[in-house]
Image (spheres, rainbow, N blue to C red):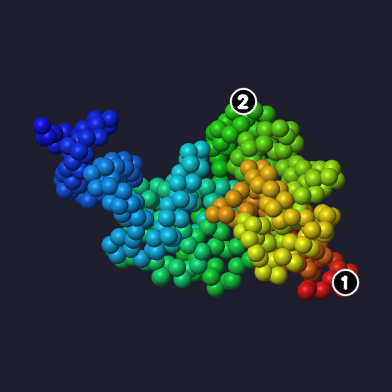
Amino acid sequence: MLNPFDTFPFVSDTTPSADLARIKYYRNYISNNKDGRIDNKSFSTAWEDIIGAVGRLGGKKMFDECKKLRASTLGQSTVPWNIKVHINQILEAWMINNSSFVETRSAKYVLECLHTNICVTITGSFGVGKTATLQHVALKLADEGYDVLMITNPHDIVKFNNPNQKTLFVMDDFCGTHSIKQIDLNRLQTCVCNLISEDLCLSQTEKQVLAELYLGSKATEIIEYCDLYDCFPLLCKLYSDNLKVNIIDFFKYPFLVYEAEIDYLRTKGFSGKFCALVLCVMFNNNVKEIWFTDKIDTVIQRVIENTCEACRLEKGTSRLVLLDELRSLEHTFLKKEVNVYKTIQKNIFNFLAFYFGKIMIQCLIRYGDSDLIMQRFLLEGKNFMNQFITIVPLNTIRCTCRD
């Protein structure tokens, strides 16, 4: 006797009648949904139940069509499906990161500003929590029904704008680490949330909560150093990822810890790992995995070969060996996103660029990425100059020429 389809069948029941009941159940659920919305978790559960039932009833062909439909562009979406899939993957990573986010007054204020302003810019010194705050607020708006789109160019706002959908366009680090065109800056200054301002900086209570979250019982050991650097949130995160270092030294002199680590790699025979970090700087924090597995153009090959030579690796060192070294540095210095290696934090890259700029400046200027040279090297010092800018000595200018 067929299932009357009035109730949802047991998970273990995969008979044809049970599968028909599943389909009817969700059909009724959707048709009776007055606001036309469904949360992500419920949608994923329903989707898996439905395509499972369709696959068992209609065979592999219909099951494959359902899988293809999941990644297809529906309705009037202005965003290509492949970009949308990538954005969804990023949002999933953000949700994982957000699980350890401490709700701050600055995050609440940014969210309030987004409800009343068409454009909000988050500013502050490195490591203060700009990206974490941005991601947290973006996820909040996603829960409110906004379509969150990560873009890298202001023109994408016009390109992907959908008048039928509430959309939050997110541009992380639009201003660049060290430079920005004044005309672009003026356009973004309609509403600025400065995370190191007196009203929005971390309160002592927030710092205490942050330290306890990441450091546990060790939080009391460093609370007197929490005001030394604006990047206190970043230091808490980095220390929790590397508990072997001395906690007092790390919070008093954080970059000395990393400098000592790289000095160790350079002087104790770990030339491959040292070279992998140099390559990250050479390619301006954008090292593609494919460069070490497939054929590459002569320009990239020349940069890799000359970097290996500068790091005193044996001539003809396999690119696969370098790839292994990049992989070995994941979760300590590097991370891999969409088959591209970069530092785990932008501020670690700031330090690496400055560090290598001191000890192998000619190699960087001769073979480094042009944007790297433009943003991080100056011929003479300036007032209020960023601490990670490298001043090029006059004798280096005379003897170094770009290939």
Q: Looking at the image, can residue 178 be seen?
A: no
Q: Residue at x 50, y 48 (%)?
A: 133
Placement of 104 over or under 304, stated as above or below: above
Q: Quadrant of the C terminus?
A: bottom right
Image check: 127 left or right of 106? right
Can you give x and y, in whole percent of width and height, for residue 216 in the image? 59, 28
Q: Quadrant of the N terminus?
A: top left
Residue assigned mark 2? 217
Q: Amino acid at mark 2?
A: Ser
Which mark is drawn over residue 399?
A: 1
> Given the current orientation, which residue lies at the most extreme top position?
217
Can you give x and y, in whole percent of width and height, for residue 223 in the image? 65, 33
Can you give x and y, in whole percent of width and height, for residue 21 in the image? 17, 38
Q: Residue at x 46, y 58 (%)?
A: 150
Would you call the spot at circle 2 few (<14 residues within 10 Å), some (14-19), or many (20 or more)?
few
Q: Residue at x 78, y 73 (%)?
A: 402
Q: Quadrant of residue 297?
A: bottom right
Tell whether label 1 touches label 2 (CB within 8 Å).
Answer: no
Residue at disc 2, secondary structure: helix
Q: Quadrant of residue 367?
A: bottom right
